[in-house]
Image: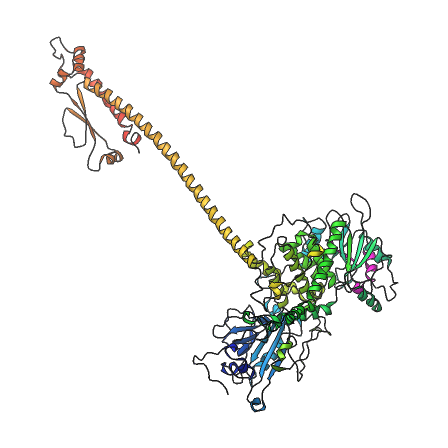
Amino acid sequence: MTPPRPPSGRARSLRDYSESEKMEGTGSWDTLEWTKLDSQPVSGSASFSNLSCLLESERIVVEGYGVVLINTDEAGTLLVTNFRILFLSEGTRKVIPLGTIPLATIEKFNKMVLKVQSSNRLADKNPQRRLLQVTGKDMRIIVYGFRPKTKQRRTVFDALLRCSKPERVWDLYTFACGPSKFGNANPKERLLNEYFRLLGKSSLRASMDMIEDGSFTFSNELWRISDLNSNYNLCQSYPFAFMVPKSISDEELLQASSFRAKCRLPVITWCQPGSGAVIARSSQPLVGLMMNMRSNFDEKLVAAFCTQQAGTGERRKLYIADARPRKNALANGAMGGGSESSSNYFQSEIVFFGIDNIHAMRESFSRLRDYLDMHGTTSSDGRSSFLRHGGWTWGGGNLSSMSASVSLLGDSGWLIHIQNVLAGAAWIAARVAMESASVLVHCSDGWDRTTQLVSLACLMLDPYYRTFAGFQALVEKDWLAFGHPFSDRVGMPNISGPGNFDLPRQSSSAGSFPSSPVRQSSGSAASQSSSSSHAQNNYSPIFTQWVDSVSQLMRMYPCAFEFSPTFLVDFMDCLLSCRFGNFLCNSEKERQQCGIAEACGCLWAYLTDLRSFAATSHAHCNPFYDPLKYDGPLLPPAASLAPTLWPQFHLRWACPEEAKSADIEVQCRAMRVKYSEMQKDKEAAERRVDEISFAMESLSAELLRERRMSWSARESANRATKEYAALTRAVQSLGCNVNFTTSDVEDDPRTCSLEDNNPRRRDRHGNNSDVSVSISLMAEESRCGNPLGRVCEALCPLRTREGVCRWPEAGCAHLGSQFVGLKANFDAFDRLAIHDSYFQS
């Protein structure tokens, strides 16, 4: 019997119902508000066409409503676009990261029907659960639940068949998107620049003109750059240029290439500055079943790596490192391959690292993914986690059951493989750094295990490769240029077609979740897909394994790398999603034929653009990076090579809370951001203090100038006072008065008035008053009382002894001449502008 709907009308979570309701096919399955697609179009709908989360050129192909994400019991809308599966939460349309996965990241997907065990009376009333299981290459298994008796699952499944594995590489989303703002510079130029750095010619910069006219064949005392493969005629999986000993001619290189599998002759991938030690790479020699085939040209080429050591003059030792187990190398002799004999190669020693092949790595990765899904907090069946809701259900508390569960991690073998790769790379780095020996590394074809070992050894030896720019150069040189088959190993279409990566699409009548045996306890699962075996294809997580090894080095040396584990995770997500074209196709030649650099965006440019907004405070930057402390090789001892799960990558979907083990790094980065802000505030405060100090100095200088001007004005005023007193006495001696008035002066025939006509000086005394200076004759009685006047009258030649003027009508000529002189002096004194010069503030 179907339970009633909740009063609120909102769909209840699967966990709101009892286990019996779930298993009986009732409960949340009937209460969800399903939207049938029978009567509605499922593609091209305008309701989601304007989503802000859609990328450039991303278009919706199919929409599915009322879908349940079984991992977390969330209901929402499932959208299939030409780039990814989008899962939006119900109502808010918020993207659910766990349910959102790029199409190229999908390893496989299966239609499944969960048949519920029940009595015959209720068998017809219990609907089957229609599930779609999506397995990702990024360690997650997603299960979507669809409403029975609808065509939603079929529609979504068919859309995934069309879009997830296109027939041609040009049908991928990255070609539809184009380079956009993340243009890809020519990778050949970057490869040559790295060669120039290794040769000690960093001042040289490669260009397209240099590549087209073949003028890039520079050399030093020991090594040279060869253009023998410029047209990829020598080896189709090698780059257009490679480094070889300077003493070996191109004709000898051509002869030596025929003795190596896939013509991948020994070439130099890294040389130690100053010492002459090198790390070389190649494929296996074609010695045959009896191990008796030889090549003089190959032996001469390999012997050229044993250059003379500086100081001693002795030839350095050569180690030939075979990455395979010894038995595998011998088995390859039946197919014409095999391994070298130390007696045929000068001063050499053969070692085997025992690293398994791509098929063993693929199965190990699959078992690790199943283990994490089974024991994580977001298991794909929604209920079989050992740590569900933090409750301890480890086998009912049985310690033996707990031990058996934990042992499954070791049974996956993934950490053992990581340890073998780390140990091999550390051994190579130690031989080069401590013995100054040269090492030639190869496996079968020289593009899987060989690439892992040489690139990891270079990362240990050269601090440059532990920076952002160096890491890019390392990946482009050893992985892309030297032909790691990314299309085959990552499971992408290549230039010749969809490749060997076949999805399990055939129907079968019965099956089960391949990862969780405990899921069959409450019912049986019927699968509409065949087994997930990859025995007939070349898919293998070789590059993922190498990046995992890099993360292990970062855990051992947290201050030696400029980039953080978060950078590696984002880097892997970009690679697996095929959003950019850098890692498409199987070789440099194929990428050139497809025009990848011109037609697709660049992953490196995208990651650089992300960091440009936050500089060193970005999550990709390692806050503990100390380049001065780690400016030499990293040589981890054997005891430290104990790898653990990479939490940021392995646990982020199955155990999201536990994956946040880098909280200390996040806190440190936040502290660095706060410290940077405080530094900026401090610098701003210091600049403000400098500005205030400068202003105070300016004001002090201005005050000093004002004081000097005030002192000068006082001195001038004192001089003017003295001059005024002297002039007053002189005028008075002549019988005249000098009066300064601020009111109008009445005309007087005996008065000479001088008014100040300068408006500036008048305004300083007041707008309504005038300053006037009058010189008038003194009264007779005043003159008589003036002793100076009496002296003057006594000395006047026109006066008689009786005191009578002999020429009263003509006036006193002496007095007139004195008055004229006084008038001239007063005019000159008036032009001095006392108000302007003496009394300025």
Q: Is residue 369 placed above or below 781 in the rendered structure?
A: below
Residue 182 location in percent, x, y?
59, 61
Up the image or down, 495 lies above or below 466; here it is: below
Residue for point 11% across, 9% down? 802
**Magenta stretch contains residue 527:** no
Q: Residue drawn 25% across and 26% down?
A: 827
Residue 126 shows in the view: yes
Q: Quadrant of residue 715?
A: top left
- Nearer to us in this view, 467 or 243: 467
Q: Quadrant of residue 164?
A: bottom right
Q: Position of residue 420 (x, y in %)?
A: 72, 61
Spot occupied by residue 172 in the image (x, y as percentages of width and height): 63, 71
Q: Which residues are magenta?
A: 250-274
Q: Is residue 266 magenta?
A: yes
From the viewer's side, name the closer residue of 767 and 286: 286
Image position of 500 with respect to 796: above or below = below
Q: Residue furthest bottom?
A: 121
| Picture quadrant where residue 147 is located | bottom right
> Along the horizontal axis of the image, is 810 left or right of 229?
left
> Residue 548: horizontal and vertical position, in percent?
66, 62
